[in-house]
Amino acid sequence: MASYILKRVTALVPLVLFATLMTFMLIRLSPVDPAEAYFSAANIKPSEEALTEKRIEMGLDRPFIVQYVRVVKNMLKLDFGDSYLSSKPVGEEILKRLPSTLQLAFSSMLLALIGILLLGYLSAVYAGGWVDRMVRILSYIGASLPQFLLGYLLIYIFAIRLDLLPVEGKGTLAQLVLPSLTLAVAIIATYARLFRENILEQLKQAYVDYGHTRGLRPRSIMLRHVVRLAVLPIITGLGMNLGRLITGTIIVERVFSWPGLGRFFVESIFNRDLPVIQGYVFFAAFLYLCTSLLTDLLHMAADPQLRLREKVRE
């Protein structure tokens, strides 16, 4: 296990470097001049001499590779520069907003996991019945609705019509419900049907018949064996979605005025705050790859065959 983790962590390094290279190239190829963006964010109309001095200060007069190596060195020291807008370190700005995004992402994932297990299990147990048909209809609706439209629909129903939940802000459990549900619905719609198909596929396997032959109770076979194996692909899918949730809550955070990373990133794009954009992309790539590693480890912990296969390779 230790050697597997070491190999995976080592593999993260070139992937993160590639992500930083692509981001750096796209920023340098964009028509936005970083020096002009700096003065624009500060609402200053610069002279040509001031622009030239700022470009030299930013190292923009140096060759591309020299600029990139300098940026990578600074990032390895967790120095992403200062925000053009707030003049504060980018790393500090990201860490200040990270807890809000993590709270939203994990609550959404918890809601999604409950919904997937409940609806997928009921749909498989009552396959072909009215419960199965209702879950299928809800899955189609949930998967087809855009997140911003679903968010406004939930606001209209639960905040405006029923006056049960607040629309925006952060601080109470009630304020967390609507944005979490908005993010969770699409995941539930995608993976509830997959979980159902996995359960039905496992029920066709020979070990199920062997369990019945031994006199095991059907519920014991279902919960201790069938569900355990059927949930493995769901773990992988949810693990990949966790990284996307943490770094991709932009739309939902805008709709519900949630003070997280997504809203901060959108504001940085509008203000052409290039250090924030570059730091956010680096952080997003690193976080996404880390959640991918965590997913593989959870999958290995839940599947004895994978652990045995890894021991044989070692």
Image: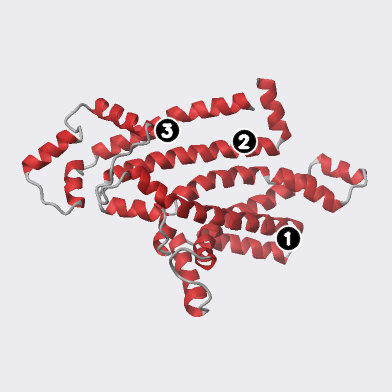
Determine the residue positioned at 58% across, 47% down. 238
> Which numbered marker is on residue 136?
none
In this view, 271 is above or below 58: below
**Counting residues from the N terminus, which is met first, the one under dot 2 or under dot 1?**
1
Amino acid beneath label 1: Gly
Image coordinates of residue 5 in percent, x first then y, are 58, 29
Identify the residue under disc 1: 128
Count neighbours of disc 1 (C-alpha within 10 A) and say few if under 14, some if 14 to 19, many if 20 or more.
Answer: few
Picture quadrant of residue 296: top right
Image coordinates of residue 178 in percent, x first then y, are 51, 65
Q: Are marks 1 and 3 in contact (CB under 8 Å)?
A: no
Identify the residue under disc 2: 297
Image coordinates of residue 195 in percent, x first then y, are 67, 50
**Counting residues from the N terminus, which is met first, the one under dot 2 or under dot 3?**
3
Q: What element carries label 2?
A: helix
Identify the residue under disc 3: 16
